[in-house]
Amino acid sequence: MADEIYKSQIKQKIAQFEREKEQVLAHLELVERRIKWLKQALDVMDVDSKDIQQFDTEHFQYRVYRKQFNGKITQLIQKVMKAEPERYWRVLELTEAVLIADKQPNTAISEYHTKNIGTALIRLVKKGLIEKIVVKKHKIIQWKWIEKVR
């Protein structure tokens, strides 16, 4: 008779472990699904910007939004150009100086950086703060801070 009691207790324990096993497997499936989702998110984030930029048009630029400058570009340009008002700047030189002023000295200069600086320079020309000097013979465009005499 004692054997029957032990057998029933063992069978109950087996049933209990089977239920726990089902719960653990369901939880494991949930965890594996979440891991799969996170890996997919990483794949989406690893898209190369050149793959996206190939679809750019004249009027629209596809890009993954990422701020290139920490400060405001026009203010950074003014700060850099005011520091050396007699100097003539090319866009690439100015971009490098602005990145240094923006506390990003080791950042590689991209076409996106130079386009943003160029656009900001055109805005500053329209405001009358800087002047654009074009040397057609050598196809050089330079920018200079206009010193206002008061």
Image: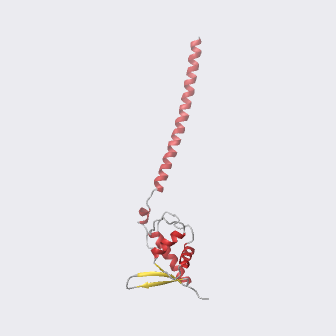
Nearer the observer, 70 or 51: 70
Quadrant of residue 127 within the rendered picture: bottom right
How many numbered marks have been drawn onto this rendered protein structure? 0
Q: Is residue 40 left or right of residue 138?
A: right
Picture colour scheme: secondary structure
Nearer the observer, 21 or 147: 147
Q: Is residue 10 above or below residue 103?
A: above
Q: In the orientation shown, which residue stands out farthest toward the right?
A: 150
Q: Quadrant of the N terminus?
A: top right
Residue at position x 50%, y 66% in the image: 105
Q: Is residue 125 above or below residue 106?
A: below
Q: Quadrant of the C terminus?
A: bottom right
Q: In the orientation shown, which residue stands out farthest toward the bottom?
A: 150
Residue at position x 55%, y 21% in the image: 11
Residue at position x 49%, y 52% in the image: 41
Nearer the observer, 44 or 108: 108
* Residue 93: percent from left, percent from top: 46, 74
Q: In the orientation shown, which residue stands out farthest toward the left?
A: 137
* Residue 147: percent from left, percent from top: 56, 85
Quadrant of residue 71 within the rendered picture: bottom right
* Residue 100: percent from left, percent from top: 52, 69
* Residue 19: percent from left, percent from top: 56, 30
Residue at position x 51%, y 78% in the image: 121
